[in-house]
Image: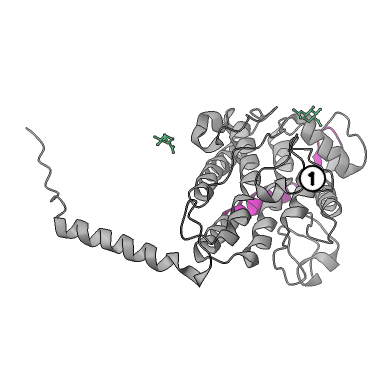
Amino acid sequence: MAIRYTFPAPSRATIFASLLLVLVHSSSSATDNGKNTNTNRNTKVPSSDLDLLEFPLNLEYFEAEFFLHGSLGYGLDVAAPNLTGGGPSPVGAKQASLDPLVKDVIEQFAWQEVGHLRAIKNTVKGFPRPLLNLSSESFATAMNMAFGKRLSPPFDPYASGLHYLIASYLIPYVGLTGYVGANPKLNGAVSKRLVAGLLAVESGQDAVIRTLLYQRAKKKVYPYGITVAEFTNRVSDMRNNLGHEGLTDEGLIVSRERGAERKTAGNVLAGDQDSVGYARTAEQILRIVYGSGDEHVPGGFYPKGANGRIAASYYVPK
Ligand SMILES: *[C@@H]1O[C@H](CO)[C@@H](O)[C@H](O)[C@H]1NC(C)=O
Ligand SMILES: *[C@@H]1O[C@H](CO)[C@@H](O)[C@H](O)[C@H]1NC(C)=O
């Protein structure tokens, strides 16, 4: 017996009414704030917001590739080739030896990052994936810098779930401080909504990573005999030093003066004296992710520099 579909076809009146709604909606928000509007991609985004909205793609690409490869063994080239914009494949990324819980969580983060890339690219034109150096050596170099000496054997982010979480501690927090820093500079409502939404999930990821690490804060990371808390404190200190603009970062166990209301040394989440999230500028972020402490000197995880107008304004492309 044939199945009969009983959904009524939309009437002309319904279609007309929907079209009208779309038109009314876009024309009212196109004049949002009365600022210049960009005809490039999305008439709802003031041109003054474009560079600020596309800059975070640099970090979202890093996170997408690191989390996809780490949990699944493949990256955007397989998972969402459209989102690469034809940029080069990352160097040295690979599947990590993860325990089931960490694998499950990181795979969820990976797909969230795919969504974040799409959300940004649906709002602004953006740019192609930058070259990313996600090799073990690249993480080992960052970790040696954090400790001010060569760790032996070199730190390998892909060696275990714990190593991978420590490596993950390096980056998402940098991205979320960038969203806090960008927010007050945005003019359009659509831009603010996007950045608040990205900040919400990035902060959540950071909280999950920090909580998983906090559970093992006093555990010694094999084979270094150095605790998890010490790793996080060293990485946070390094980021403070590279950023050059004071305290914007805190590890998992701090002096009481830095804990919430100066009442606790446990520091599962980082925040300022009022427990408000720290902000970073794009320049501070570049200094950190390049590992050079200088936005004019690309390197580290971005051997050829980050992409987009903000980053490119500081270096001559190689
Ligand atoms: C990728 O791009 C093609 C061609 O533009 C399009 O048909 C397809 O729907 C896109 N896929 C995704 C996942 O966006
Ligand atoms: C990746 O980083 C490592 C460690 O700094 C370096 O030896 C290697 O040459 C880098 N690869 C690329 C393609 O930049």
The secondary element bearing badge 1 is classed as helix
Q: Which residues are magenta?
A: 201-224
- Identity of the residue drawn at 79% across and 43% down: 219
Classify residue 302 as left or right of residue 185: right
Rendered position, 5 above or below 81:
below
**Camera sees residue 111:** yes
Mark 1 lies on residue: 228
- Dot 1 crowding, Cα within 10 Å, few <14, some 14–19, many 20+: many
Rendered position, 21 above or below 318:
below
- Quadrant housing residue 90: top right
> Is residue 84 in the magenta section?
no
The image shows residue 317 at horizontal and vertical percentages of 74, 38
- Identity of the residue drawn at 63% across and 28% down: 95
Classify residue 51 as left or right of residue 260: left
The image shows residue 75 at horizontal and vertical percentages of 58, 31
Q: How many marks?
A: 1
Q: Amino acid at mark 1?
A: Val
